[in-house]
Image (spheres, rainbow, N blue to C red):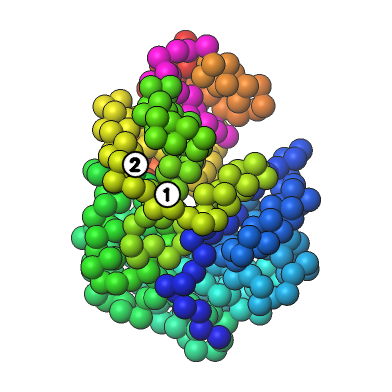
Amino acid sequence: MSIDLKSMPKLGFGLMRLPESDGRIDREQVCRMADAYLAAGMNYFDTAYVYHGGNSEKMVKEALVKRHPRDSFTVATKLPAWCLKTEADRDRVFNEQLERCGVDYFDFYLLHSVEDGGNGDTYDRLDCWNWALAKKAAGRIRHFGFSFHGSPEYLERVLDAHPEVEFVQIQLNYADWENPVVRSGRLYEILRGRNIPMVIMEPVKGGTLAKLTDDLEAKLRALKPEASMASWALRFVGSLPGVMTILSGMSSPEQMADNLATFTDFEPLSDAEKAAVEAVRRSMMSVEQIGCTACRYCTDGCPMNIAIPDVFRAVNTMKLYHEEFRPKSFYGGLINQGHGRAADCVGCGQCEGVCPQHLPIIDLLKDASARLDG
């Protein structure tokens, strides 16, 4: 049964950063969060083949399929180009995903991280576009789209070549609106101009926008003292026309409660609030940061087991807050947990090959080592 893509719940539950206990996903906590989300009238659950080493998809079965009627929730998952070598791999991965999730079909299915060259070439070479349409015709996919991490020019070429696409997932938040690498604003304008529904990822920029410096928070609290910083980021995105669903990778019941409060009787930003957010954005952009969203694609294949996003988090904290004790203590904790130092990087380039933000990770780790390993 087709779904009205323009009448979707504004908040989507991203299953990318689930709560963990003793190194494993905390099933009981996820179940409580899923129940609260469904009780609030929301139903969009987003996972992927690679999230939590494949265990995110398995949690769909545990928290949803085994506990709730199938028609009470929708599931979105993704086909990863970097796991495909031959055409046969398409069905192999897809069938494994059905088994993991415990479902007969996916409500939404995406080609994961389409970008210029690399992944985009793989999807074309293996004809994943027509393969997905065949799955849709067979009833195994209800709606077909792709997530995107490429240039605006490439997005237009992909959309011209594939008018069958029903929705597109992009990274968008107020900090990245004019980011010269991400170019969220331009991607939004292209999709909006073509009237293509959008799923938004990284609305809080990997948690970066959930905690600002005191002076920046004061600009927002002057207008809405009780509101969380995350709610401002989510309302910015939710106020944009054409947005189908906004994904939040919630990792605690508290985050779930805060986000549900934001989207229950949702209030778009007023003109005064838009001006305040823009003032915060301009101030933030005056401090150069590493544009890492902590997707963690880089960590699985790192031969030195460097917790790259966490290292960059420490560096950004040093830059933003002009202090060393906390970030260096945090970094020391990573080393004590068995992770490699930034100085241990061997320059293999695996991380740069999968980074959706196209960050020069090898050079950034050298800089991080100079800051943190001394």
Q: Residues within 10 Å of mark 1 (few under 14, many from 20)?
A: many
Give the amino acid at mark 2.
Glu
Please name whichever residue, 60 or 44, is drawn nearer the observer in this view of the structure. 44
> Which of the 4 quarters of the picture holds residue 148?
bottom left
In the image as oriented, which residue stretches furthest toward the left?
A: 153
Give the amino acid at mark 1.
Arg
For residue 44, say whether it is visible: yes
| Image side of residue 303 versus residue 40, left or right | left
Q: Which residue is label 2 attached to?
A: 273
Q: Is residue 314 magenta?
A: yes
| Image side of residue 24 versus residue 216, left or right | right
Residue 127, percent from left and from top: 39, 77
In the image as oriented, which residue stretches furthest toward the bottom?
A: 137
Q: Which residue is label 1 attached to?
A: 235
Q: Residues within 10 Å of mark 2 (few under 14, many from 20)?
A: some
- Residue 35's place in the image compared with 318, above or below, is below
Q: Which residues are magenta?
A: 305-325
Quarter of the image where the N terminus is located? bottom right
- Residue 204's place in the image compared with 217, above or below, is below
Mark 2 and mark 1 in contact? Answer it, CB < 8 Å. Answer: yes
For residue 59, say whether it is visible: no
The Cα–Cα distance between marks 2 and 1, rounded to whole angstroms, is 10 Å
How many numbered marks are there? 2
Query: At x 30% / y 79%, what residue is drawn?
Result: 163
Main secondary structure of the magenta stretch: helix
Residue 42, percent from left and from top: 59, 63
